[in-house]
Image: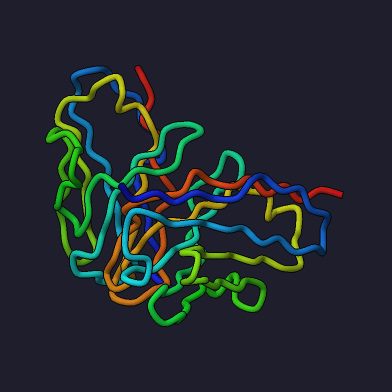
Amino acid sequence: QVQLVQSGAEVKKPGASVKVSCKASGYTFTSYGISWVRQAPGQGLEWMGWISAHNGNTYYTQKFQGRVTMTTDTSTNTAYMELRNLRSDDTAVYYCARNRGYSGYEEHWGQGTLVTVSS
Amino acid sequence: DIQMTQSPSSLSASVGDRVTITCRASQSISSDLNWYQQRPGKAPKLLIYTASSLQSGVPSRFSGSGSGTYFTLTISSLQPEDFATYYCQQSYTTPPYSFGQGTKVEIK
């Protein structure tokens, strides 16, 4: 079955960077893309961006452009999301999800990774 | 970017009630509209994709309709496990995609 397993919780100081991983199994990794979605405490879902595991093409929401980098490692079927210059309002649960990318949808989700930004 | 607006933001209903949530897009998105359910502390779960297609394993009391800029999610007979927050999402052609602000369904 399709599984997305994310790395563990992180605590970071303002201005630092965080890199969250998402290891996929149960399907052909390069046939889909990976979306990243975050959710601040008590808030709604915020779609951050998407990367094709086939060719590495990326699409980022304008809000995160210049501060986020999404990558994949096809040798380990793992996707990564790096967010730089962290602020306190980046405190959130970060989810990865499988999405084919063209008129696609998030069909399978990781368990989420809590990133806390605090001095 | 395409903006999604859900209404209401929250609602109270009883078991057995029929519930309808609406979602409007800031521009036409054809039928590229998806619905998710999220229970507290859990990852979202896909319910409906491309406006009206029921995801495998999702009970038939959930249905979706609409196209263009106006969409609805209907729960025909609310069950105890349906008390959760529901999000619409547009996935029109290529990313970036976006979610509505969510509708919390609470017990009356």
In percent of the image, x 49 and y 70: which residue is there? A75
Percent across and percent down for residue B78 are 22, 25
Of B101 and A109, nearer the camera is A109
Compared to B80, does A3 lie above or below? below
Of A74 and A62, nearer the camera is A74
In percent of the image, x 38 and y 59: which residue is there? A98
Q: Is residue B94 left or right of residue A65?
A: left
| Quadrant, the N terminus of chain B | bottom left
Q: Quadrant of residue A85?
A: bottom right
| Quadrant, the C terminus of chain B | top left
Percent across and percent down for residue B100 are 40, 53
Q: Is residue A41 left or right of residue B101?
A: right
Percent across and percent down for residue A96 are 48, 56
In percent of the image, x 25 and y 44: which residue is there? B47
Q: Is residue A2 left or right of residue A87?
A: left
Percent across and percent down for residue B59 are 17, 33
Q: Is residue A77 left or right of residue B73?
A: right
In percent of the image, x 36 and y 30: which residue is there? B105
**Way the structure is coloured:** rainbow
